[in-house]
Amino acid sequence: MRIYTHPACLAHQPGAGHAERPQRLQAVTEALREAFSEVPWFEAPRASRGQLLRVHDDALLALVLDTVVDGPMALDPDTVLGPGSAEAALRAAGAGVAAVDALMSGADDRAFCAVRPPGHHATGTVAMGFCLFNSIAVAAAHACDQHGLARVAVVDFDVHHGNGTQAIFDADPRVMYLSSHQLPLYPDTGRVDERGVGNVLNAPLAPGTGSAQFRAAWSERLLPVLNGFRPQMLFISAGFDAHRLDPLAQLQLEADDFDWITGELVAIAARHGQGRVVSMLEGGYNLTALRECSVAHVAALQR
Ligand SMILES: [Zn+2]
């Protein structure tokens, strides 16, 4: 078990009052350092342009990396590019790439990337939903293209559907995308009939859904399909905004649910993927819940 982060991820400043604020990452890293003093931390490198171009087009790279900004610039009503954003986005994506390389080298079997901005809403061409680059997609593509893996899975339990990850991979049978999320909710995608080339599986959950229905959705619908896919490496879009305290959504999960789902995923990774799991922080907007859930998640990753 190892953890990647970088101080530059705190310098992405979406502006006063924005939910996706640097204090989120501070809360996560403080809680993890306190709970897991024995786990080694690594500084995230920058993703290279070539690594980003596996999933994004030139125009999005130019927008995020080459725009000169001296203050917060809104890309859409939710998504802001500021002076520190390019470096934060490069380090967030680079964390996942470095984690893949470390796991494929055999140096470790699990990695958690404590990074921001989040990534799963960014499509190949559009930064949206607080996300600039799709870091988990960059990491999954790196595992396939650089390391030659034929089957990797991205599992997304963030309360929002990872429309960007799905769109990037929905014609790529090497990558399976599985998500539980609240619907209706931003970005209003993730319906059960969105199946890609048979490599996409969505389990939308109604507002108010709690632990029992969440666990049933995974146990009965998502996990059997994931297990049948036999992923050689497992990626987790670890958003903790399905917690009952989260201000942006209405699911009713507890920290124990994130412990449970993580344990189930680790078991599948152990069965098919030599235990290899790369987890990346996505959403989660209540600091108390973020602390509790990130500790529960990393504890389960370590087991
Ligand atoms: Zn979210």
Image (cartoon, rainbow, N blue to C red):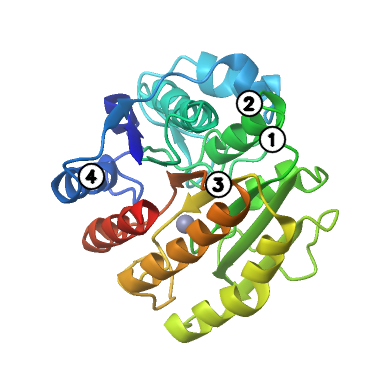
Q: Nearer the viewer, residue 46 or 298?
A: 298
Label 4 is placed on what type of residue?
Gln
Dot 3: within a 10 Å radius of its alpha carbon, few (fewer than 14), some, or many (20 or more) residues?
many
Name the N-terminal-most of marks 3 and 4: 4
**On screen, 121 above or below 187?**
above
Would residue 87 appear left or right of 228 to someone viewing this image? Answer: left
Label 2 is placed on what type of residue?
Leu
Q: Tell me residue 243's x, y (percent).
A: 36, 69
Q: Tell me residue 230's x, y (percent).
A: 69, 54
Q: Is residue 210 visible?
A: no
Of tags 1 and 2, the one toward the viewer is 1
* Label 2 beta carbon within 8 A of ligand 1: no
Name the N-terminal-most of marks 1 and 2: 2
Name the N-terminal-most of marks 4 and 2: 4
Gap in Å between the C-alphas at discs 3 and 4? 25 Å
According to the picture, the residue beneath numbered tag 3 turns out to be: 235
Gap in Å between the C-alphas at discs 4 and 2? 27 Å
Gap in Å between the C-alphas at discs 3 and 2? 23 Å
The quadrant of the image that shows the C terminus is: bottom left
* Residue 124: mark in rendering: 1
According to the picture, the residue beneath numbered tag 2 turns out to be: 60
Q: Residue at x 21, y 48 (%)?
A: 27
Q: Nearer the viewer, residue 49 or 127?
A: 49
Of tags 3 and 4, the one toward the viewer is 3
Q: Nearer the viewer, residue 172 or 167?
A: 172
Name the N-terminal-most of marks 1 and 4: 4
* Residue 23: mark in rendering: 4
Gap in Å between the C-alphas at discs 1 and 2? 8 Å
Q: Quadrant of residue 46?
A: top left
Q: Residue at x 44, y 49 (%)?
A: 282
